[in-house]
Amino acid sequence: MAPGHGVPHGPTMDAAARPPSGARHQVREKRRQMYANDGFRELDRQECVRLLGTVPVGRIVHTRQALPAVLPVNFCLDGDDAILLRTSATSELVGAIDGAVVAFEADAVDAAAHSGWSVVVTGTATLITDPAEHTRLLSAGPRSWVPAPREVFVRIDPELVRGRELVGGHTLYGVDLGS
């Protein structure tokens, strides 16, 4: 016991009672295999970017008053993989995300087939201030769904891109549930 705390100090399991390291490895490997076939398939960056190009709406995740905030936004891809948003210059969103690290998520789900995918992009959001770039994006960027008198573009340069695909609801931990 730690002095004055009444709480056990040090290891609580007798060393003789612990499984040998080989057994611990087998348990970890069994868990890894179980979760490796949980019905999801990890997507590589190229697949993630391709899938992002197939949907018009995603969700931007940022911090607002020290709490997470999630907003649906229409978007498009700019260049190879940057996320591009168009919003009102006076929106709360612009002030909250310019220069901040944000997450962006988009997905597609087929409830009848129990399939779909989800991609999360994490990166720094930057307000486009270059006049030539702004002019280019007026024709090439995303269309505004809620036009505002003065609109701006925000680019999210991806640092992390992760995705998963649900490959069907017919298996559970590798056991075929039948059709």
Image: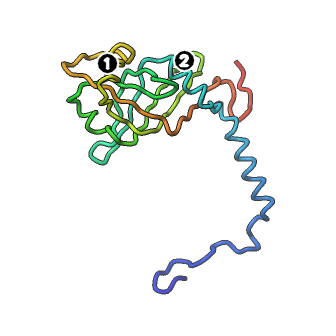
Dot label at residue 48? none
Quarter of the image for the N terminus: give it.
Answer: bottom right
| Residue 74 percent coordinates (x, y) | 37, 21
Q: Could you tell me the amino acid type at mark 2?
A: Asp
Q: Quadrant of residue 95?
A: top left
Task: Tell me the CA gap for discs 1 and 2.
Answer: 38 Å
Q: Quadrant of the C terminus?
A: top right
Q: Name the residue beneath numbered marker 2.
A: 110
In-front residue for pair 40/133: 133
Q: Which residue is mark 1?
A: 135
Residue, far top: 139
Q: What's the residue at 35%, 39% (across, down)?
A: 62
In primary-sequence order, the first of circles 1 and 2 is 2
Q: Residue 27: horizontal and vertical position, in percent?
A: 74, 53
In terms of depth relative to the viewer, which is nearer, 58 or 132?
132
Tell me where residue 164 appears, x and y as whole percent.
59, 31
Count the numbered circles shown: 2
Residue at horizontal 46 percent and vertical 30 percent from the top: 105
Answer above or below: position of 99 versus 91.
below
Residue closest to the eye, 153 or 19: 153
- Circle 1 packing at 10 Å, graded few (<14), some (14-19), many (20+), is few
Q: Secondary structure at mark 1?
A: helix
Question: In the visual, does 150 lie left or right of 47?
Answer: left
